[in-house]
Amino acid sequence: MALTRPALTRRRLRALVAVAVALAALAGAFVWFAGSEDRALEGACDGVLPVGEVREVLGDDTELDVTNRTEGSFGKTASGSDETAKTAKSDGSGESDGSGGSGEIAKSAKNSARRANSLSVHCRITAEDTGHIAVSIAGSPRPRAEYGYDDLYTAVPARRTLPVPLGHGWSGLFATDTARLDDAEDGTATTAVLLDCARRGDSLLITVETALRGAATLDDPAVRPDFVRTATATAEAANDHWGCGARLGKPVRTVGLPVNEDEYEPLLGAKGTCAAVPTASRSAVSTARETARDRAPREACVLGTRDGSPLYRLEAYYGPYAEDARSQYTRDYDYENVTPAEKPAGRLGRSAYWAGATCPRGAESALYLIRAAAADGETRRRPDLAYERAALAAFAAASAEHHGCAAPTLPGG
């Protein structure tokens, strides 16, 4: 006896069609959502975010949440003309007041008055189980109207540790506030890359915070490049996207650890940022915490007693970091008659001296500082001011020479 299939009734036919439509819609929605995530990722940070590196660091199969904001412009003069760079794509107008500059040295002030880069880009990619990558890109110099308020650029952690240079031909920093490995913050680091553009005085600062959960630890030399690759790849794309034309470095396959508070050494044997800084018997200065220089846009040297207790902190700022430091001193020391924003050298309160140096190609003038560890200068008894000036002079001269800047202008006695 032959078997025959039951005929499809209209009701059954409609049901099958409805199921097919629902499945197609579901598949389409899945494809749409997946494509939507990819489009959001590809458009993040005005399209310069390296999607491949981000997925490799956060996980290929991880669901990502993307937030994004781009505003302002890069490469415009005070008159509003765009000389070579592209205007940032944004919902905001990004207008510039055209009065950018610092004013601490006449040449820098004149150069800055002609330029104002209001470009400000921020994006954050979060993977719920893996961590996040937060990227900021800022053009330099900033419009003068931004001075004296919030930070001009994304800060780099440097309170408890000393950032180390990226090396490999990059002008950059690798930093973390982690005082000890395996603590709650191990697995979070900040990488900064400074691009000195072909156009005189203009630069782009790319700052990337990478936070990885789980087994990721900064103590593993094989893992540390994962905290850096997004920043350097973003810098390469930004260099092309905004027509910067900067000299780029090579892939970073190794990077050192930021220097912790207990990693001090005899000052007499210093070979990095503390090299050439003299000891002082009266002030009991005999130890140092330092890093290599290697084109880092920010340098630090901490001088201490025999047991490593800090006495003085020497710092050098270049490019956007010098501009930001002067802006902050204008804000925080507005009660002083003179700050680093007004003069190339001087004394700030009773706990700090500063010096300055003119740098090549119209860049922001470098800023050098020495500050007593006891920040409240009013409480210091018998400060060794002559030593403070001598230490600043030695530190500033060595740093300026390394960066190709002119001999520093130093504070008087």
Image: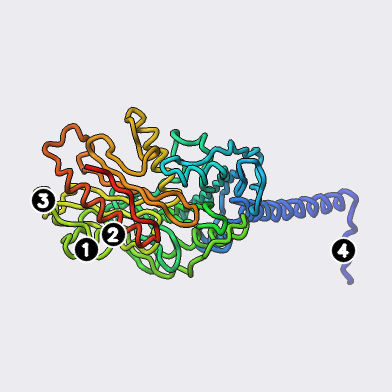
Q: Nearer the viewer, mark 3 or mark 4?
A: 3
Q: Nearer the viewer, mark 4 or mark 2?
A: 2
Q: Which element type, helix, strand or loop, lies under badge 4?
A: loop
- Amino acid type indicated by mark 4: Arg
What residue sits right under mark 2 in the picture? 273
338 horizontally vs 151: left or right:
left
What residue sits right under mark 4 in the picture? 5
What residue sits right under mark 3 in the picture? 284
Residue 159 visible in rendering: no
Residues at marks 3 and 4, CA–CA distance in whole angstroms: 100 Å
- The reply to whether dot 4 and dot 2 touch (C-beta < 8 Å) is no
Residues at marks 2 and 1, CA–CA distance in whole angstroms: 8 Å
Residue 342 in the image: state x and y as whole percent: 39, 37
What residue sits right under mark 1 in the picture? 270
User: Crowdedness of circle 2 by 10 Å Cα count: few (<14), some, many (20+)?
Assistant: many
Q: Which sits earlier in the primary sequence, circle 3 or circle 2? A: 2
Residue 237 in the image: state x and y as whole percent: 58, 60
Q: Which sits earlier in the primary sequence, circle 1 or circle 3? A: 1
| In the foreground, 32 or 266 | 266
- The reply to whether dot 3 and dot 4 touch (C-beta < 8 Å) is no
- Amino acid type indicated by mark 3: Ala
User: Image quadrant of residue 258?
Assistant: bottom left
